[in-house]
Amino acid sequence: MESHSFFSSTNLDFNLLKGDCLTVIPHLDNNIDMVFADPPYFLSNDGLTVKNGKVQSVNKGQWDKLVSDNDAYVFTYEWLFAVREKMADNATLWVSGTHHNIFTLGRILPQLGFKILNVITWEKTNPPPNFSCRFFTHSTEFIIWARKHPKVPHYFDYDLMKRLNNDKQMKDVWRLPAIAKWEKSCGKHPTQKPLALLAQMILASTKKNALILDPFAGSSTTGIAGNVLERRFIGIEQETEYLQLSQARYEDLQHEGRKEFFKQHFYRLLNKGNDN
């Protein structure tokens, strides 16, 4: 593992590994409690979108370019197989997507032995506008929640989720904004997820000190949310730029008062977003 190591915190609760997840994952121990994966959606097709009021390219990088549908299927199968091998028997997996990849994920997960528990709909309260005016504005993403085995119970903090939802059962539609300025103080990844979204998944499906894996770590939002909530983290990323951003975010989080600041934002957004 030393050859893949990029950064580890002093107490080893935040670990960044550089490389292709298919190469790195086989070297991990088989004790992962939760996986969050935000795999490539393969949307970099030279199209246009609107960001911050400006028309911009949708291209995010070579890693997001689709070679063929079959290649996308094989890639999805391989990384899910590799991840499942390292999950504890009672562990769960969260994997995000849009209509471009969610159906492929939904097909492969049961083939590998996963049991799908929910398909969460994340409704963005501040989506980018649809400037073509030819279809409805895209304002949602999906997150599949699955456990490793159909008949092995998983951990779910039902009571906490209910408390976060005004003492009502929480639904599978979560209304949360996309990332805010306070989440980009060290820089920004092109597909960065909001910290509150990751915080809700982590709180729902893990206990303190749980080990969380993100095989497509990007700027390590999963790890930052996990560190605030006292979980351990392993993030795998190929791009040095984003590994450096991840390390900077972690180091910023260690400054006095930062974790409490983030935690307050988490719970404010979660209580607001789950008021349904």
Image (cartoon, rainbow, N blue to C red):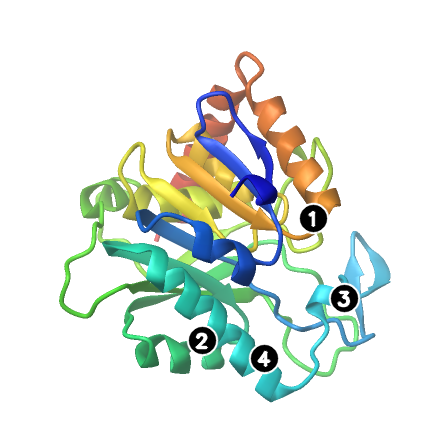
Q: Which residue is mark 2?
A: 105
Q: Residue 12 placed where, x, y %?
A: 45, 28
Q: Which residue is mark 3?
A: 62
Give the amino acid at mark 3: Gln
Disc marking residue 189: 1
- Residue located 41% across and 34% down the image: 267
- Residue located 50% across and 60% down the image: 123
Please tell me whether residue 104 is drawn above or below residue 181 in the rendered image. Answer: below
Give the spatial CA distance, label 3 vs label 2.
Answer: 21 Å
Q: Quadrant of residue 172?
A: bottom left
Q: Which residue is mark 4?
A: 72
* Crowd around label 2: few <14 · some 14–19 · many ≥20 (10 Å): some
Q: Earlier in the sequence, mark 4 or mark 1?
A: 4
Q: Residue 132 placed where, x, y %?
A: 79, 77
Q: Which is more foreground, mark 4 or mark 2? A: 4
- The reply to whether the C-beta atoms of the residues labelled 4 and 1 are less than 8 Å apart is no
Give the amino acid at mark 1: His
